Image (cartoon, rainbow, N blue to C red):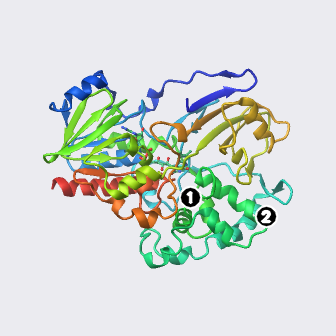
Amino acid sequence: MTSRETEPARHRRIARRPFLKAAGAAMVVASVGGVGSAQAADRRGAAADESADALIIGAGYAGVTVARELSARGMKPLVLEARKRTGGRIWTDTFSGEQVEIGGGWVGEQQALVQRELTRYGITTSPDIGPERMLLPGDSGLESMTPEEAVGALGPLWAEFYRGSESYFERPYEPLHRRDLLVDVDGLSLADRLRQLSLSPREFHRLNSETSLYSGGPSSIGALTGMSQWFQLAGGNYESFLSMNQKPAGGMISLLRAMLAEARAEVRLQSAVTRITESNGAVTVEVSSGKRYTAPLVVVATPTNVWQDIVFQPGLPPAHATAARQGIGVPHSNKLWLHVRGRTEALFAQTPEGSPISMMLPQQQLADGRLMVAFAGPSLDTSDPLAVQEAVRQFLPGSSLIRYRTMDWGRDRYARGGWGLRRPGQLLNLFPRIEEPHGRILFAGADIARGWHGAYIEGAIESGLRAASQAVALVG
Ligand SMILES: Cc1cc2nc3c(=O)[nH]c(=O)nc-3n(C[C@H](O)[C@H](O)[C@H](O)COP(=O)(O)OP(=O)(O)OC[C@H]3O[C@@H](n4cnc5c(N)ncnc54)[C@H](O)[C@@H]3O)c2cc1C
């Protein structure tokens, strides 16, 4: 079980509402599979059960972008989605009666594609709740300060951390433009970069709280060029990076639903693809029920980390095989929703690498308590209500939790990781080959985006647009 809701006081689970309400578009239907896997093997040589103009695997932002673009060009794509819902790593749901985001939660004004899509469907955004007080690592424990003091302390540190990225990402939307300069930095992890700087222990911890959070574990996981590209895309300063805190009306899923409604593409839920075979100028796709589909092309719009679960025939080319093996989605991404009893100030907290909770952000105050979002580090057992309660008391001494909900994306079988953050060396080793089609098998997804890669739906849309153009070029 990767997503759970708990009431510490009574230690009991709350039954969650069915997933299907999140499905959205009218044409979303459940799969009608039913053929066992042994039978499936027998049928492998047989003709496919259904055909489409294009098959799209995954109904996240990347896959839905492809579906809409191909539909707009008169094609009839079919989307195969493993889950019982659309959205993938975007999951707008409820907690304590409030609409919440279990996966990605914010967009930014700097993200041109998202802004264009929001405008297209008339979806407004509003800024998230700002903190009244901040806790940052200090010389002994956490230090309390105003938000202005915190930005004043962190801004120069991040400027130093990212120094040079304005040159090696001179054009952040064309990350390979200064390949000559990247050669010296792309192999560096975030931890390597921290070691390069002459930081006091306090400064070191103020930075590594975020580098470890974004790495989904130790700061040695994420590439310096991964985060520094985001920094340059955001505008090259800490305050503009922080400003990416907009929430779309109706939640992060509202835009995806609008795109899907326009696409009028059929989505088959509970259709986990297990095999993709290209032969004789066509692609055949098999799902876990044994059902088979054929089309002139397929777009694989799943997280990179699950490519290893699909049998590709012919096998993946070297860049794709490397990405599948190394992963791009971060290994540990456990997002918690907390309902803290009583009236609580809007507190933002950040802790040194290795802490049970890496970051906590304030959300709305309700009649009986405040909601908060937290990101758990690998050391916190989020299935243990007492451990979670204890971790929250690190920031809010004496507080008590009414309930909490946790989603461990690293253990989710259709994500196998959280947001994407390239590993050291991956920019130069994988790009641009990872963007290229493999015969009639095309690839999309935020993890392999060129601009806002990994941790942003902007990247999913960007890569979906690219894959759709490749698909159109392929079928002429
Ligand atoms: C905790 C968390 C916080 C985040 N915060 C933000 C944020 O604030 N802002 C932001 O913009 N982004 C954020 N992100 C990142 C964002 O969610 C992703 O970048 C984006 O949603 C990825 O879209 P995608 O379409 O590439 O992949 P996904 O959304 O992962 O979609 C891929 C789809 O493929 C399906 N699939 C997988 N395997 C198979 C299979 N074998 N057969 C069929 N279907 C399959 C999956 O079920 C899924 O629906 C966050 C992510 C996480 C996990």
Amino acid type at mark 1: Gly
Identify the residue shown where x is 76% and y is 24%: 9
The one nearer the camera, 381 or 11, is 381
Residue 420 percent location from the top left of the image: 50, 52
Q: Is residue 117 visible?
A: no
When the figure is inspected, residue 279 is found, relative to residue 189, above or below; the finding is above
Q: Residue at x 76, y 34 (%)?
A: 389
- Residue 235 in the figure: left or right of residue 340: left
As measured in the structure, the alpha-carbon distance from the residue carrying label 1 to the one carrying label 2 is: 21 Å
Instruction: Report the front residue among 19 and 257.
Output: 19
Residue 222, labelled with which disc?
1
Q: Give the structural element (helix, strand or loop) at label 1.
A: loop
Q: Residue at x 75, y 67 (%)?
A: 152
Q: Quadrant of residue 134?
A: bottom right
Front residue of 180/103: it is 180
Q: Nearer the viewer, residue 69 or 6?
A: 6
Callout 2 environment at 10 Å: few (<14), some (14 to 19), or many (20+)? Answer: few
Q: Position of residue 251 (x, y in %)?
A: 52, 41
Q: Which residue is mark 2?
A: 201
Q: Residue at x 67, y 66 (%)?
A: 194
The answer to whether residue 279 is visible is yes
Position in image of residue 28 (x %, y %): 34, 31
Image coordinates of residue 116 in percent, x first then y, are 41, 57
Q: Is residue 151 left or right of residue 90?
A: right
State the quadrant of the N terminus.
top right
